[in-house]
Image (spheres, rainbow, N blue to C red):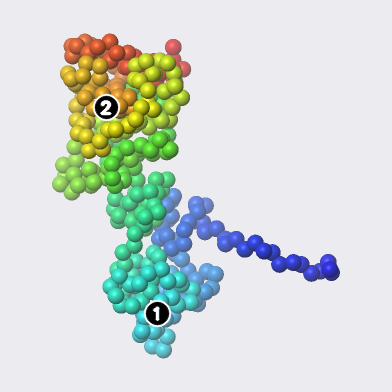
Amino acid sequence: MSSTRRRKSRHPVPTPELRCKCGHELKRFWPYCPSCGRAQVWRDEPPATDAECYKCGWVVSDFYSFCPWCGADIFEEGFSREKPMKAPKGFRFDARCDWGCGGGVQYPMPYCPWCSREQDWEDDWYDGSCTHCERGVNDWMDTCPWCGEDATGQSLIPRALRRVRRLLLVSGIKDWGYRVVLRPGVSGVDPKYPKIVEIEQDYVVGARSRKEIPWTTLVGLICHELGHSFLYHHWSWTRSDAFKRVFGEVHKAYRVRDDAWVSFQRRRVSTVRPQYVSAYAGTHPLEDFAETFRFYVVRRGRMRELLAELGRKRKEPIAYEKFLALHHYVRSLRGWR
């Protein structure tokens, strides 16, 4: 074989990565960068249709009657097709128009290029939904790639987050890199992702529409979920004899109902269940620790006040030992004796 001849590679040529000017990786047709929030313009690069919208500058097809990205009228005599098509050159067919005009649309076109009506897409492969536009977002996103607003929902609860950060600081608990996000469903922490603290967004959005956000309850809820995140992040502590003696075995079967009622607004230790700080703490060792962590943080780690209150509520010695174990562990993380 001549040295000038080369065999064709059997491996497909990799597609170039799409990145924002800030360097963050993007997915095609995201209107905003999820990292820096910079607006994106998806032009005809590399050339595929030789046409761009006069209004938004995004790539379109000559056959379209309307821009599928901004909804502008781009009909041209002799070019635009009056009869809807499934997939013109440069675009793929993902679904039919929601309004039954017969035209095909590609994800994530917000408008039909044939009748200009808005399209509804289901973003099932994302971690959650944006609190502003209800489109799909992932937990690592700072900015919603669809509307450019805050993807975490933290902008809706700045007062509660400031309060929680202040309580953790004065309690002597070091920041372990947790991230609070508002998501649909049930509040909680996934053990696989211990730093992601999910707060049920309807609880905040619904109350916000009524201008009645219960800030005290919200702070208590966040502190409770942070207790789960803190324990998952320091999971090796659960294998120690000191932890098992006061809180029990965390691998115990979890049969706690998601709709169980808990008064997160309460700042005083409950009088029921003398071995626990609240009735909900007695449902499982994980919830026992989370509730102990919540009371410890909300009361700013003031052990004298906590132990005195336990005495007034006639709690058993094991309840004292739980706060002492947590207090000593927190101090050990900061290198205190």
Q: Earlier in the sequence, mark 1 or mark 2?
A: 1
How many marks do you count on the picture? Answer: 2
- Are there few (<14), some (14-19), or many (20+) residues within 10 Å of tag 2? some
Q: Secondary structure at mark 2?
A: helix
- Are there few (<14), some (14-19), or many (20+) residues within 10 Å of tag 1? some
Q: Nearer the viewer, mark 1 or mark 2?
A: 2
Q: Is residue 234 above or below residue 1?
A: above
Q: Residue placed at 46% from the left, 72% from the top?
A: 91
Quadrant in the picture for residue 246: top left
Q: Residue placed at 84% from the left, 68% from the top?
A: 1
In-front residue for pair 246/251: 251
Residue 156 visible, this orientation: no
Type of residue at label 1? Answer: Met
- Per the rendering, the mark at residue 55 is none
Quadrant in the picture for residue 61: bottom left
Q: Is residue 133 above or below residue 332?
A: below
User: According to the image, label 1 marks what residue?
Assistant: 85
Quadrant the C terminus occupies: top left
Q: Secondary structure at mark 1?
A: loop
Residue 224 percent location from the top left of the image = 29, 30
Q: Residue placed at 31% from the left, 44% from the top?
A: 182
Between the residue at mark 1 and the residue at mark 2, the CA separation in whole angstroms equals 59 Å
Q: Is residue 81 above or below residue 38?
A: below
Query: Do the residues bearing badges 1 and 2 touch, measured as CB atoms within 8 Å?
Result: no
User: According to the image, label 2 marks what residue?
Assistant: 283
Residue 137 visible, this orientation: yes
Type of residue at label 2? Answer: Thr
Residue 99 percent location from the top left of the image = 28, 73
